[in-house]
Image (cartoon, rainbow, N blue to C red):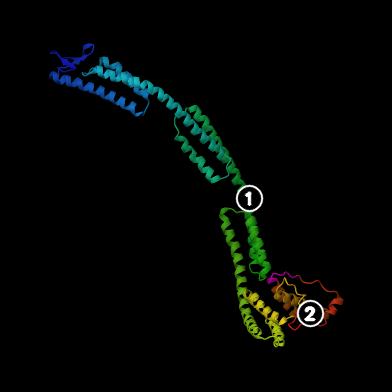
Amino acid sequence: MSEWGRVTDDGTVYVKTADGERVVGSWHAGPPEQGLAHFARRYEQLATEVTILEARLRSGNGDPGQVATSAERLKEGLPTAAAVGDLDALGRRVDALLEKTASAVEEHKLARAAAREDAVSVLTALAEEAEKLAASSSWKDAGERLRTLGQDWKRVTGVDKKSADALWERVAGARARFAERRTTHFGALEKQRSVSQERKERLVKDAEKLASSTDWKPTADAFKALMADWKAAGRAPREVEDTLWGAFKAAQDTFFQARSAAFAEKDEEFRGNQQVKEEILAEAEALEVPGGKARLRQLQEKWDAAGKVPREVMKSLEDRFAKVEEKFRGTADTSHVKTTESTFVVRLREKVADLEKKLAAAQAAGRPTGDVEAQLETQREWLAQAGVPVEPPAAEPPAAAAASTKKPTTAWVRADG
């Protein structure tokens, strides 16, 4: 005998409810107490199932409609349940659960509708992104994103098949357009690279022809023009670009290394001239005014005859010598000298003019002109290095050439005027 049921002598098992007792089964396998315990465990199983449904509803996880279905099934089975326990209380719990599921089902429907709208919005955004990428020329980045976009798509759930299929068609169309544009682009690029390869092969040949030249300045200018053409030619196919550049650069390096060596050799030769001019300069700077004028004229001639010096010291030496000349110039008339030019430049101009007259006279008389031409070229180079462009003079008429055989006037104003 228990609070919720009993077993009769013939083994019939009853459960007590608010409507009275009803038979739930029979028990002949042992004492009545064991029979009641057996049917009480069945009750506990029912109660546990209700507890699980209540927990599922409270958690908000899952579909409350499924909870309601399970609760309805329990409610329908309680009146005939083969269990011993407080079935009336369990029935009230199931009724309360059903009331809660009714409102939860409506809320779930609204949430699902909202989630579906959000999911459709996400898929729509992905479709729009794909369509923008279809027009992109960032081939690598856009292509990679179009590939990974499909993975993002798969993570979105809750969209009906019809809507999802319609949106995916937009993505597939964008992918197809991008692939077509990329194929066209790289096809044209491949054609252009073939043209670039041919152009660069010609530039390599031109560079290799120039590599052994010793005509330093024109060849250096030619290499500069070739480099500009190289940059403008565009890239050749990847498998030959590095090889072509290596050949072009090797020719370039051969020339410029040879030029550097030649300049270094020439500068070394000019070191001796530098030493001579430094000695002349030291003596000139020690001269006193006015007694040293005659000696200065001698030093000026030795200075001109000393020849070239290394570029890095040429201007400083000439400026120092010009200061000595200026010191001895005194109050002599220098109005014909442009104040905007240094004394060094004025001297160079006058020296060039003097040598040009000598060259014209030698040509008119049929005498050798090699020495005069060499001196004239040297003076013109110095003038050019000083930043003054010099153009060779036009050929003189015969009368002028004859006249030029006369001894020229002083090439530049001496200190004694």
Is 142 magenta? The answer is no
**Image check: 113 left or right of 343?**
left
Pick the residue in front: 365 or 19. 19
Decide: few, some or many residues near mark 2? Use Cα within 10 Å; few <14, some 14-19, many ≥20.
Answer: many
* Residue 40 in which image quadrant: top left
Region rendered in magenta: 384-390
* Above or below, comparing residue 146 to residue 393 in the picture: above
Give x and y (percent) for residue 11: 15, 14
Rendered image: mark on residue 192: 1
Residue sitting at x 37%, y 24%: 64
Q: Amino acid at mark 2?
A: Lys
Q: Amino acid at mark 1?
A: Gln
Residue sitting at x 24%, y 23%: 45
* Residue that extends furthest to the front in the rendered view of this protein: 331
* Above or below, comparing residue 125 to residue 185 in the picture: above
Task: Measure how far apart labels 2 and 1 are at the Cα level.
Answer: 58 Å
Is 386 magenta? The answer is yes
- Give the residue pinned by disc 2: 358
* Residue that extends furthest to the right in the rendered view of this protein: 399
* Residue 88 in which image quadrant: top left
Give x and y (percent) for residue 144: 51, 43
